[in-house]
Amino acid sequence: MAHGPQPGFKRWLFTTNHKDIGTMYLWFSFAMFLLGGCMALVIRAELFEPGLQIVRPEFFNQMTTMHGLIMVFGAVMPAFVGLANWMIPMMIGAPDMALPRMNNWSFWILPFAFAMLVSTLFMQGGAPNFGWTFYAPLSTEYAPPSVTFFIFSIHIMGASSIMGSINIIATILNMRAPGMTLMKMPLFVWTWLITAYLLIAVMPVLAGVVTMMLMDIHFGTSFFSAAGGGDPVLFQHVFWFFGHPEVYIMILPAFGIVSAIIPTFARKPLFGYSSMVYATASIAFLSFIVWAHHMFTVGMPVAGELFFMYATMLIAVPTGVKVFNWISTMFRGSMTFETPMLFAVAFVILFTIGGFSGLMLAIAPADFQYHDTYFVVAHFHYVLVPGAIFSITAGVYYWLPKWTGHMYNETMGKVHFWLAFIGLNVTFFPMHFVGLAGMPRRIPDYALQFADFNQIASMGAFLFGAAQLVFLFNVVRTVQGGRKATDEVWDHPQGLEWTVPSPAPYHTFSTPPAVR
Amino acid sequence: MRWSDNAKITAKLLALAGGMLVFALFVMPPLYNAFCDITGLNGKTGKKYEAVPASVDTERLVKVQFVASNNENMPWMFKPSVVSIKVHPGEPTDTVFLARNPTGHDMVAQAIPSLVPFDAVQYFHKTECFCFHQQTLKAGESAELELRFIVDPELPPAINTVTLSYTLFDITERVSANRNSDNKNTDS
């Protein structure tokens, strides 16, 4: 076995090393994050004033669609897979992932999927313009010709996610160091194990729904065409049967990251470890029986509305357990507020706000007022940006010294945090108000009375975007050099990853560690 | 061949993923349709009903309203001959919808029914309906489209009015595309 990476670009092309692949996932997702972010800024620039000034409505629709798709499938999910690749083998004392060649493949098909998706912007008829939820028949009968490329790119992303998940499950179940029982695993490993099962269960459903679209468009079937005896509402059921577990796919690993960071900086063990595991599993289970709360307005019987309303509210219980546990971990701890901790604390506060607006949306009779307004946009950005993005950022700051062997610049990290924190709230908080006042989502123009809040939101968006450049600069500088990090990096953090040197050598745990 | 632990779990998980794909493609749509048939959700009224001898409930009158609309770019004139009828439950009733193709070319249409309230769907039977077939009208041609229905005497007493709506879809292109592909198949 070679003891170091191959020189040149072949190292990255042919690597089967979990650290290299993790790094590639993370850089890829950051590139997608910036691309999707630029699209969000096009949206916010257009919405700075009422009326149409910067882009045509057709292009605006392409921006909302591509922003959603790229952020969900290109930024958040690959970032979590990247963190899983880097950290899971090191956390469970494994030398590498269980299926290293498949690991390489599952990464390298992603750039092709996204090249195909982004190339639709330059095609005749433009990119997909039907929203990231691509409801039929908007995405079938009325779709631009590029929809076929969109469908194939979704297929590839699905294949990539499924392979990544199989790899993660095989690693966790087969490669743990002796003594690392399931209930000793760090929560990040636990949440990823459950997330991987969710992915394997629902990514095929997504592949199925786009395949049905493909058949309707090109092969004359009528799954979603009422004229041929199909039903467009079926699309929404199948899509959200994928879509709701998908939102937990984007948040469960975040729970794991935060559960690693808060104990370190509160200098107390995590409160209620086993309840965290059970809460994660409960959330995963409940995610399969709440999908229709995204579609309260399609005309469901009252019994259906009630079932999905109560089932949705039930999710607040395990989620509440988690928030309670994080707060209890911090309670009377010797807390310090380094950058990862700042992001983690902000995660707890802001994710809870997003959870509360989710509860408001769960109330079926009230949802008829909020449905498809900016209130929904505010809600899911409050759970996804401070939820997924902040936790990924926190994880990167937390483990970056272990990856690179250098400490990042703490002052710059704090500047990044405060710019991002202020920018995020300035962007998304006013959206609650315009949404409740009736501003619909996905429309490039709006009534005059929404102008003030939209201007505030747009200014916040540019601030948030600028903050990410600080992050990029800080990470690049840390990779290049900086103060040497110790092996432990932080003040007595828990976990096997802190027992290896900083930077982590190319091969770790070639002989399994002893786990007490 | 001996399978390693990793190969075993990979095979299991791939089978799970494949099973979920089959579930999404081949189980969910029929399941959804069956669910809608049973519950009457989406107002999809059922297939052709074979009339069974039933007593007519002359004590009771139910108002049946008719709505006709065109999907998107469908150019036909399409309307019910009467907008509402009062019927006794159990009594077969005939009515017609009027359709005209005002364009200069032959067209094929399909009518899709929907009934509200959804609770009434399973008590509304059609023994004859133009929606069971495709409708072909030559350029400028008119037609009376026949409907014969029975309101079931078991209709819940709380329901006094039902509204039956038809949406007319232009399926000319779909039909000609299928015909072309059929021709191609017979040629070869």
Image (cartoon, coloured by chain):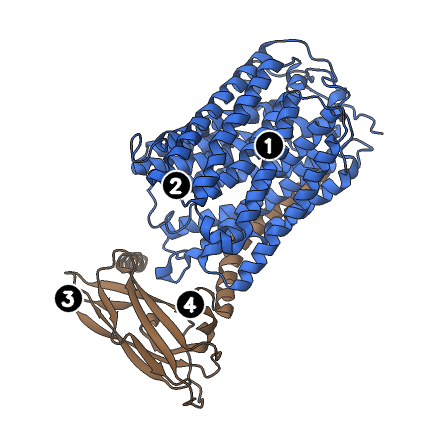
Chain colours: A blue, B brown
Q: Please, what secondary structure does the residue beneath circle 4 have?
A: loop
Callouts 3 and 2 on one subunit: no
Who is closer to the viewer here, A70 or A465?
A: A465
- Tag in front: 3 or 2: 2
Q: Which residue is mark 4?
A: B44
Q: Which residue is mark 2?
A: A442
Residue drawn where x is 45% and y is 32% of the image: A114
Callouts 4 and 1 on one subunit: no
Amino acid type indicated by mark 2:
Arg
Q: Which residue is mark 3?
A: B140
Residue at mark 4 to residue at mark 3: CA–CA distance = 31 Å
**Image mark for residue A80:** 1
- Tag in front: 4 or 2: 2
Going from N to C along the chain, the mark reached first, 1 or 2, is 1
Mark 2 crowdedness (10 Å alpha carbons): few <14, some 14-19, many ≥20: many
A139 versus A16 height, above or below: below
Amino acid type indicated by mark 3:
Gly
Residue drawn where x is 46% and y is 34% of the image: A70
**Image mark for residue A343:** none
Q: Quadrant of residue A310?
A: bottom right
Q: Chain of mark 4?
A: B
Do residues under tags 1 and 3 come within 8 Å of each other at their CB atoms? no
Residue at mark 1 to residue at mark 3: CA–CA distance = 62 Å
Q: Chain of mark 3?
A: B
Who is closer to the viewer here, A123 or A100?
A: A123
B148 versus A363 height, above or below: below
Residue at mark 3 to residue at mark 2: CA–CA distance = 41 Å
Do residues under tags 4 and 3 come within 8 Å of each other at their CB atoms? no
Residue drawn where x is 56% and y is 59% of the image: A306
